[in-house]
Image (cartoon, rainbow, N blue to C red):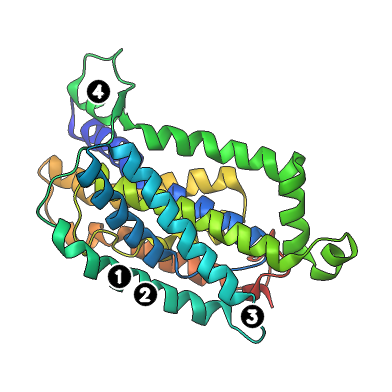
């Protein structure tokens, strides 16, 4: 196997592994933003979900119970965020930053006892059984949560287009007046959407601590919750594009380790910064008023 092929296979495997938290957090933020609310607190939700899932998995010996606990923890954070933002004269951005600090602070405080204990890992699925190439087999060994996330993206695309719940979220996100005229209470819908988005972010955190990298430590997230907000903008608020964008960001994050795996160490830290450079590029591109906000819900604060 030549060097180029080895790098491409390593990037493929890394993209699948690294993209999973991006996928869950971005889909959660997509649901929230579709309702007309932005949640910058998902970084704190992600970290607290990672800690909660790991702690419960350690104590129960079951990683799936840990995932459920992480989802519940994320839903609680989303619920609190949604309820506070429903109050008059409350700014979504400020509350999001406060929730981010609260989530990371609580995770660091309660998670100190779980830095050393080892939790059981989530199971993986061998999709490379047909190949005799060890590198390709390793690249195609995917976690079950990645498969769930891949299924969730088209499911949300379908739900927003055809189901009553999806249409209600879209109406609320586009016009408070139209929603009220239909007898819909926008605040209730936004609270539910924010709680659902928080639950998905918590699952993304559980993936970090229970599979990749598969341990709990205070630096586990590296800003992935905040990057996911930019990812949703980059995906133009479309679930299927979120899937592609998550894989793109995951591939960017896997580029440095992939090059290092074949002995290319020059500029390693520069390649390691690729996801952040990509995020910066997305934010610069989305700052334009002409076309950058196409597809954005009209009640979303960043569009006003």
CA distance for labels 4 and 2: 41 Å
Q: Earlier in the sequence, mark 4 or mark 2?
A: 2
Tell me which residue sits at (54%, 59%) in the image: 195
> Closer to the camera, 216 or 11?
216
Tell me which residue sits at (9%, 54%) in the image: 116
Q: Secondary structure at mark 4?
A: helix
Res 87 label: 3
Q: Where on the picture, by quarter, is residue 84? A: bottom right
> Closer to the camera, 224 or 133?
224
CA distance for labels 4 and 1: 39 Å
Q: Where on the picture, by quarter, is residue 20? A: top left
CA distance for labels 1 and 2: 6 Å
Question: Closer to the observer: label 4 or label 1?
Answer: 1
> Closer to the camera, 226 or 91?
91
Q: Quadrant of the N terminus?
A: top left
Q: Where on the picture, by quarter, is residue 37? A: bottom right
Pointer 3 and pointer 1: residues touching (CB < 8 Å)?
no
Pointer 1 and pointer 2: residues touching (CB < 8 Å)?
yes
Pointer 4 and pointer 1: residues touching (CB < 8 Å)?
no
Q: Secondary structure at mark 2?
A: helix
- Residue 79 lies left or right of residue 274; in this view the side is right
Residue of label 2? 102
CA distance for labels 3 and 1: 24 Å
Residue of label 1? 106
Q: Position of residue 157 (x, y in %)?
A: 65, 41
Q: Is residue 85 visible?
A: yes
CA distance for labels 3 and 2: 19 Å
Q: Position of residue 275 (x, y in %)?
A: 34, 59
- Residue 161 lies left or right of residue 154; in this view the side is right
Residue of label 4? 137
| Within-10-Å neighbours for mark 1: few <14, some 14–19, many 20+ | some
């Amino acid at each position: 196997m030549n060097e180029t092929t080895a790098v491409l296979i390593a990037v493929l495997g890394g993209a699948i592994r690294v993209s999973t938290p991006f996928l869950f957090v971005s889909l959660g933020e997509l649901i929230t933003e579709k309702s007309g609310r932005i949640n910058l607190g998902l970084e704190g939700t992600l970290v607290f979900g990672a800690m909660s899932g790991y702690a419960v998995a350690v104590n129960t010996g079951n990683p799936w119970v840990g995932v459920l606990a992480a989802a519940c923890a994320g839903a609680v954070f989303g619920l609190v965020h949604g309820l506070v933002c429903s109050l008059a004269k409350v700014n979504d951005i400020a509350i999001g930053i406060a929730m981010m600090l609260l989530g990371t602070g609580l995770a660091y405080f309660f998670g100190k006892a779980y830095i050393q204990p080892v939790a059981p890992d989530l199971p993986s699925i061998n999709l490379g059984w047909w190949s005799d190439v060890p590198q390709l087999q390793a690249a195609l060994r995917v976690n079950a949560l990645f498969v769930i996330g891949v299924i969730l993206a088209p499911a949300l695309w379908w739900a927003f287009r055809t189901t009553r719940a999806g249409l209600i979220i879209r109406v609320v996100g586009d016009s408070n007046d139209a929603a009220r005229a239909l007898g819909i209470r926008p605040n209730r819908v936004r609270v539910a959407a924010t709680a659902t988005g928080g639950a998905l972010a918590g699952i993304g955190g559980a993936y970090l601590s229970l599979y990749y990298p598969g341990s709990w430590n205070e630096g586990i997230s590296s800003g992935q919750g905040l990057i996911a907000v930019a990812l949703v903008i980059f995906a133009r608020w479309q679930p299927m594009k979120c899937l592609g964008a998550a894989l793109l960001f995951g591939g960017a994050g896997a580029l440095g380790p992939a090059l290092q795996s074949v002995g290319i160490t020059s500029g390693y830290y520069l390649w390691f910064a690729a996801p952040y450079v990509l995020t910066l590029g997305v934010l610069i591109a989305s700052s334009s008023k002409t076309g950058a906000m196409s597809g954005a819900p009209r009640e979303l604060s960043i569009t006003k």
